[in-house]
Amino acid sequence: MLQVARAPGRVNLIGDHTDYTGGLVLPMAINRHTTIVFERSKDVSAISSNFAGEVRFGLPVIDAQAVQPAWGRYIAGVAAAMSERHMALRGFTCTITTDVPIGGGLSSSAALEVAAALAFGIDTGIDTGIDTDVATIAAVCRRAEHLATNVPCGIMDQLTSLSGVKDHALLIDCHSLDVTPIRIPESLAVWVVEISSRTLDGSEYPTRVAQCAVAEREIGPLRLADVQSANRIVDPIVRARARHVVTENERVRQFAAALAAGDLRTAGQLMVESHASLRDDFATSTTQMDAAVEHYSQMPGVYGVRMTGGGFGGCIVVLADAEVDDGAAINAATNGMRVHAADGASLTTPLS
Ligand code: GLA
């Protein structure tokens, strides 16, 4: 029997580099998906329409990073992460397709991990008959990313891919894992512009995670800290990193309120401030991304622009008035694409 596991990518409207200290983020799942069409089998074998080679491995997985070709490590990482939690695993033979740009900062890897978790049977509880809750599935998929790549990512991407709500952005508290959908006004268009393709593997992402941990040893959890205590940190680099996180959490709070109230000018202004903080205090932007942010923020009808996701390349996100026809300019000038907020991952059995 054929089954289909489908998981969306995401774009983060505001709240970057806050998730791994239990802070606030405000992403949305997007209408770009990774789809795994599979049939049950003992082991795993996968081909992808986007990557060369066939991935084959037996279960359980001992070392996800030994899997070749490398794109299969995300799938193997999910199997290894499920085994760590003693979850039962079922193998599959599958074909994978995706229209999430790879390495573009739109969480193509999280979409693959989430779809793979559903294909392994995580949602049904298999032996126990107990449904696994979304936060646990997200935690397993986050761990899969760590096992596959050594990038110590937070939980935002995987939780967003699982919890997406059509036409809504998600305010996520990465400490409690509470997800609050906020309707996106119809008059608002969300654009994503790919600046450069990259992976966080080998980037300074782990250094940023470590710098936040140093800050927390000095002043306690950043999610509870205020800017005055961040500013008292002795080391100037750690101080700047902490200041970004503390001020970004506050911007997410204000953005959520502004979006819910339809105050798009304030929301846009907060995005601009978020970009400046990621550029100056967190040092995750690039000169190319800064130039693009500057360029798009001057277009008529644009409320706000910022880098989005892990940074060091990837995408910028543009919030614009859907009525003003600048979309054509955003689209034509670059790799721009308009995205719409989509529902989260699903597992279906097509009638055939
Ligand atoms: C990447 C990680 C996320 C998050 C963002 C930055 O997308 O996977 O967990 O840390 O970077 O906000």
Image: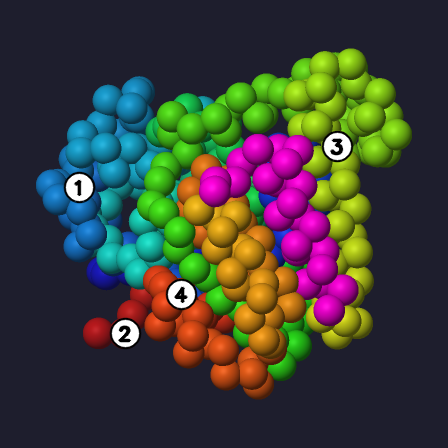
Q: Picture quarter containing residue 82? A: top left
Total numbered circles: 4
Q: Picture quarter containing residue 258? A: bottom right
Under mark 2, the amino acid is Leu
Q: Earlier in the sequence, mark 3 or mark 2?
A: 3
Label 4 crowd (10 A; few <14 / some 14-19 / many >=20)? many
Q: Picture quarter containing residue 23? A: top right
Provide the residue designation for mark 1.
45
User: What is the CA distance from the residue labelled 3 to the residue labelled 1?
Assistant: 46 Å
Q: Residue at x 17, y 55 (%)?
A: 49
User: What is the CA distance from the residue labelled 3 to the residue labelled 2?
Assistant: 53 Å
Q: Quadrant of the C terminus?
A: bottom left
Q: Is mark 4 within 8 Å of ligand 1?
A: no
Label 1 crowd (10 A; few <14 / some 14-19 / many >=20)? some
Name the spot of residue 336 as percent of width and height, x first.
40, 65
User: What is the CA distance from the residue labelled 2 to the residue labelled 1?
Assistant: 23 Å
Under mark 4, the amino acid is Gly
Span colored in magenta: 265-287
Callout 4 secondary element: strand
Residue 207 appears in the rendering: yes
Q: Residue 243, which numbered label?
A: 3
Q: Earlier in the sequence, mark 1 or mark 4?
A: 1
Callout 2 secondary element: loop
Q: Nearer the viewer, mark 3 or mark 2?
A: 3
Q: Earlier in the sequence, mark 2 or mark 1?
A: 1
Name the spot of residue 70 as percent of width and height, x first.
23, 33
Q: Residue 336, which numbered label?
A: 4
Of 262 and 111, the residue lying toward us: 262
Provide the residue designation for mark 2.
351
Q: Earlier in the sequence, mark 3 or mark 1?
A: 1
